Amino acid sequence: GTKAEARFAASACPKFGGAIRPHAPGKRGQRARKGCAVTRGKLGMTLRVLAALVGLWAAAFLYGGTLLLSAGGSPYYLCAGLWLGGLAAAIWRASRWTLGGAGLLLLVTSVWTLFENGLDIWAMLPRLGLFALLAAALLVLALKGAFGGRPATAAAWGGAAALILLMLAMPVAGLIAA
C-alpha cells in the first residue's frame, strides 16, 4: 500500500450509482481485497436487494433439498442451496468472486440437467430459467462496476458469454431434439 496505489485504486473506481470507498489495506472494517466497493446509492441498494432475494432462494433450496434428500432424492438441491447462500453473501459484499461463483453454479446445473434429463426442454426450463435471470442480472451489475470497480478481463467476459450461450443453446437443442 503506497500512496500512489491508493490514488490509483480511488481513481479506477467507477462513479455509477453511489459513493465509492477506496480500499485501505490493514484498516479495520475494510474489505480484504484490492479495488473498491459500492457502499451506498442506487447500485449499492440494488446489490443488497438482489442479495436478499438470492438468500431467500437459498433458504428455499436448503429446505426443499433437505426434504428431497431425506426421501432418497438427489443431493443437488441441498448443495445448490448452500452455494446460493454463499453467493448471496458474495453479492452483499460486492465480491469480485461473485461472477465466477454464479458461473460455476450455472455450469454445474447445466451438466446436472443434461445428465438427469437429457435434452428435454420442459425439464431444462425450470432448472435453468432462474439461474439464467440471475446470471443476466449479475452481468449487468458487473458492467456497471459493482464487483471490484474494474472492468472484467476479456477472458472473464468470454467465459461469461460462453455460459450464457450454453444456457441459450440447451433449450434450443431440446426443441430440435423433440
Image (cartoon, rainbow, N blue to C red):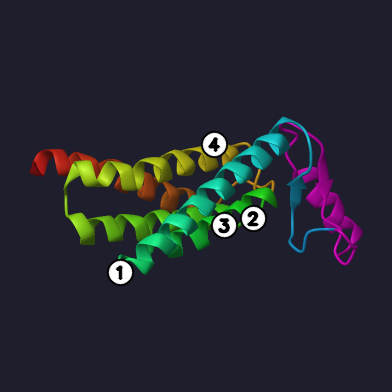
Query: Residue 39 appears in which quarter of the rendering?
Result: top right
Q: Is 34 left, or right, of 80 in this rendering?
A: right
Where is mark 3, residue-wise?
85
Specify which label sits upstream in the sequence, 2 or 4. Answer: 2
Q: Is residue 9 magenta?
A: yes
Marker disc for residue 72: 1
The span from disc 3 to disc 4 (Cα, nearest Å) is: 21 Å
Query: SS at mark 2?
Result: helix
Q: Residues within 10 Å of mark 1 (few under 14, many from 20)?
A: few
Structural distance between the alpha carbons of marks 3 and 2 = 6 Å
Q: Secondary structure at mark 3?
A: helix
Q: Quadrant of the N terminus?
A: bottom right
**In 3D space, how far apart are the residues under numbered discs 1 and 3 (Cα atoms)?**
23 Å
Q: Between residue 9 and residue 51, name the one nearer to us.
A: 51
Q: What residue range appears in magenta?
A: 1-29
- Calculate the distance from the C-alpha at mark 2 to the C-alpha at mark 1: 30 Å
- Chain-order first, disc 3 or disc 4: 3
- Which amino acid lies under the numbered mark 2 shown in the image of this protein? Ala
- Specify few, some or many for label 3: CA neighbours under 10 Å numbering under 14, 14-19, or 20 or more: many
Q: Residue at x 83, y 50 (%)?
A: 22
Could you say whether the residue bearing mark 1 is in a helix, strand or loop? Answer: loop
Which callout, 1 or 3, points at the residue further toward the start of the chain?
Answer: 1
Q: Which residue is mark 4?
A: 140
The residue at the point 46 percent across, 44 percent down is 135
Quarter of the image with the C terminus is top left
Q: Would residue 67 be found to the left or right of residue 96 on screen?
A: left
Q: Is residue 91 left or right of residue 38?
A: left
